[in-house]
Every structure is written in structure tokens, then in C-alpha cells.
Amino acid sequence: MGGRKDLTSYAYRKRRAAFLAESDVCHLCGHPGADVVDHITPVASGADPRDTDNWAPAHGVKRCPTCGRNCNGEKGATTAAPRLNTSRDWYA
Ligand SMILES: [Zn+2]
Ligand SMILES: [Zn+2]
């Protein structure tokens, strides 16, 4: 246990950047320009936040330039900025 602190590690951010560089088509609205990594299975449901198989590009920090939606924000999730505290309720 205790591995969650590397959520904000340089390696993790680098993996996210590489992931978005490979595909930036938002899985919520289907348009390009995604800027955050969303989790398909919510971390609250037991998904590992570092499992790239569970990652999907989404618009979050910036709105979608095509449809103007803030996709990840509308979903009510802020998976783009995982917190370090251990409260699982935060994700629900
Ligand atoms: Zn979108
Ligand atoms: Zn869109």
C-alpha cells in the first residue's frame, strides 16, 4: 500500500502527457482537443488510477473547441487532479 503518492509524480504526469499525445479524441463528446485523462471505471469503484487501460482522453481544463463542452467537468469528476488524501468519498 501507500503507492498513491506517486499519482503526482513526474513519471505519472509524463505518462498522461504521452497518452494524450497519442490520442486526444475526447471519449465523452468524440471531438479532438482533450486535455485531461479521465477514468472509464471510476477510481471510487476500485479502479487503479494508474491503470492506462482504464484511461480515456477528455476535455476538462479547457472546454472542447468544437462543441464548447467541459466534458469531464460536466460529469462531475475531477480525475484530472487526483488528490493525495486517502478519502475515497471524495471520488464518489
Ligand atoms: Zn469532450
Ligand atoms: Zn466536443
Image (cartoon, grey):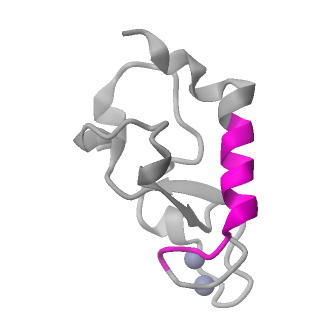
Q: Ligand 1 quadrant?
A: bottom right
Measuring from the top left, give residue 66's x and y in whole percent.
Answer: 70, 90
| Residue visible at 38% across and 19% down in the picture | 86
Q: Main secondary structure of the magenta part?
A: helix
Quarter of the figure with the N terminus: top left
Magenta span has 61? Answer: no
- 60 relative to 11, above or below: below
| Residue visible at 50% across and 74% down in the picture | 27
The answer to whether residue 18 is seen in the rendering is: yes
| Residue visible at 52% across and 63% down in the picture | 73
Q: Nearer the viewer, residue 80 or 56?
A: 56
| Residue visible at 53% across and 36% down in the picture | 82
Measuring from the top left, give residue 70's x and y in whole percent.
Answer: 59, 72
In which image quadrant can residue 19 be found?
A: bottom right
Taking the view exactly as shown, the residue that stands out farthest to the top is 2
Count of marks, rendered view: 0
- Read off the magenta span: 13-28
- 34 relative to 81, above or below: below
The answer to whether residue 61 is seen in the rendering is: no
- 11 relative to 61, above or below: above
Q: Nearer the viewer, residue 67 or 47?
A: 47
* Direction from residue 55 to residue 34 in the image, left or right: right
Measuring from the top left, give residue 62's x and y in whole percent.
Answer: 72, 66
Quarter of the figure with the C terminus: top left
Measuring from the top left, give residue 29's x and y in whole percent.
Answer: 52, 83
Q: Nearer the viewer, residue 82 or 13?
A: 13
Taking the view exactly as shown, the residue that stands out farthest to the left is 45
